[in-house]
Image: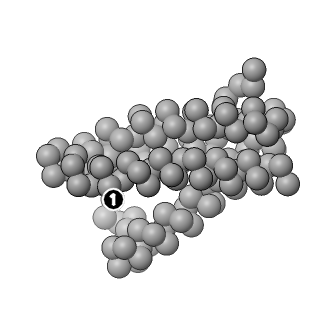
């Protein structure tokens, strides 16, 4: 149960940051620099949020360093993130998942998919002090 709760909180922290940064990126950065550059500029910020959130939550919940525990936390968070993102994005844009994936920029889309993997792995990568 502790792993599940930690995963939920990890999702909330990272999704919340993305929810705040998303409109800033869409309304201020995309018109000036384009989608690719805006998404690539946002990525280091989101990775920093992942590191801080994962480290804090692992400490807060005393998540054991065991592979299954840390990876479990990340996978719970990833499943919640993908569910929320696809439901929100698809509802707001009125497109299917296939269309959404097909219209991703090849460069920033690839970076995005890699960051999803990093999101799931981050609880495993951070050290408890």
Residue at (49%, 72%) from the top-left corner? 87
Q: Is residue 75 visible?
A: no
Number of marks drawn: 1
Residue 64, given in percent of the width and then of the height, sits at 84, 35
Quarter of the figure with the C terminus = top right
Q: Is residue 92 above or below residue 33?
A: below
Residue 56, given in percent of the width and then of the height, sits at 67, 34
Q: Is residue 17 visible?
A: yes
Query: Is residue 113 or residue 52 the one in the foreground?
Result: 52
**Residue 110 vs residue 128: left or right?**
left
The residue indicated by pointer 1 is 104
Quarter of the figure with the N terminus = bottom right
Q: Quadrant of residue 70?
A: top right
Q: Quadrant of residue 118?
A: top right
Query: Is residue 23 or residue 77 the one in the foreground?
Result: 23
Tell me the SS state at disc 1: loop
**Residue 128 vs residue 17: left or right?**
right
């Amino acid at each position: 149960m502790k792993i599940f709760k930690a995963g939920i909180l990890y999702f909330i922290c990272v999704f919340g940051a993305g929810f705040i940064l998303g409109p800033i990126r869409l309304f201020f950065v995309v018109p000036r620099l384009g989608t690719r550059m805006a998404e690539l500029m946002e990525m280091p910020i989101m990775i920093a949020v992942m590191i801080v959130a994962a480290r804090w939550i692992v400490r807060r919940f005393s998540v054991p360093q065991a592979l299954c525990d840390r990876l479990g936390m990340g996978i719970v968070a990833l499943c919640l993130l993908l569910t929320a993102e696809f439901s929100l994005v698809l509802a707001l844009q009125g497109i299917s998942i296939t269309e959404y994936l097909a219209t991703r920029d090849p460069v920033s889309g690839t970076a995005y998919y890699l960051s999803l993997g990093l999101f799931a792995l981050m609880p495993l990568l951070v050290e408890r002090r």
